[in-house]
Image: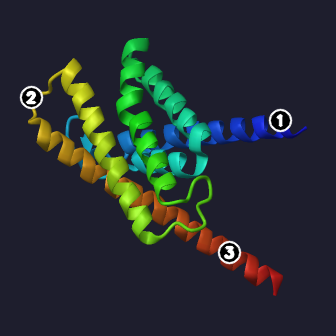
Amino acid sequence: MLRITGLVEYLITTVFFTCTYCLFYMVQVKVLGDFDLLPMVSILFIPAGVKFLAMLVGRGAGVFGVLVGVELVNLYTGKPLDLLQIGLHAVGWILLPYACMVAYLRQRGHGQNLIGLTTFDVIALVIVVSLVSSTGSQLYWNGFDAAGVPLIRAIWGMFVGDIAGIFLAMGVVLVTRKVFSRANIETSS
């Protein structure tokens, strides 16, 4: 019974982060297009926040959910299915940052338990994940299609946009948690 429950939790987490990534990517494209600093670089990239939370909270299931979400978005926007590009992009954009996050959490003694996570840890994780992700993505995109934008500027722009998106997503989660915990306290009284 435990194995089935674990599989169900994994699938629910995967589907949740797939849907959340797709939803926020569409909001990004349809509503927040004015925040684009460069091609493929937004100064406020909310899906980066979804990706960060998927890696931190959802772990492997969250990462897989975001990867599925990215491919669904790519299919929706009409990009051809190319397994080589999917694999290379996944390595630079989410797998390397996830590996760095896991290594950092293990080094700091957190492992799977996030209870002892400090503000310093969260800020360090945001910086590490954003830097590795933006560098990997921009090297990937520059290798396949040089956009004519200086690489350092593209990396910096994506880094800042990812950080802004991560902090916005974490802020939404914190406010939502506070509102619902306050609602639970009021209904209990």
Badge 1 element: helix
User: How many discs appear?
Assistant: 3
Is residue 82 rendered to the left or right of residue 57? left
Disc number placed over residue 148 in the picture, else none? 2
Q: Residues within 10 Å of mark 1 (few under 14, many from 20)?
A: few
Badge 3 element: helix
Residue 144 image offset from top left, x and y in percent? 23, 18
At 25% across and 53% down in the image, what residue appears? 160
- Position of residue 143 relative to residue 185, above or below, is above
At 19% across and 26% down in the image, what residue appears? 142
Whole-number angstrom distance, CA of label 3 to CA of label 2: 49 Å
Q: Residues within 10 Å of mark 2 (few under 14, many from 20)?
A: few
Q: Which amino acid does label 2 sit on?
A: Gly
Disc number placed over residue 181 in the picture, else none? 3
Instruction: Mark 2 vs mark 1: give the one in front.
Output: 1
- Position of residue 88 relative to residue 8, above or below, is above
Is residue 149 rendered to the left or right of residue 93? left
Q: Which amino acid does label 3 sit on?
A: Ser
The answer to which of 21 and 132 lies nearer the viewer is 132
At 33% across and 41% down in the image, what residue appears? 133
Q: Which amino acid does label 1 sit on?
A: Arg
- The N terminus lies in quadrant: top right
Q: Mark 1 points at which residue?
A: 3
Nearer-N-terminus badge (3/2) = 2
Task: Name the image quarter holding residue 175.
Answer: bottom right
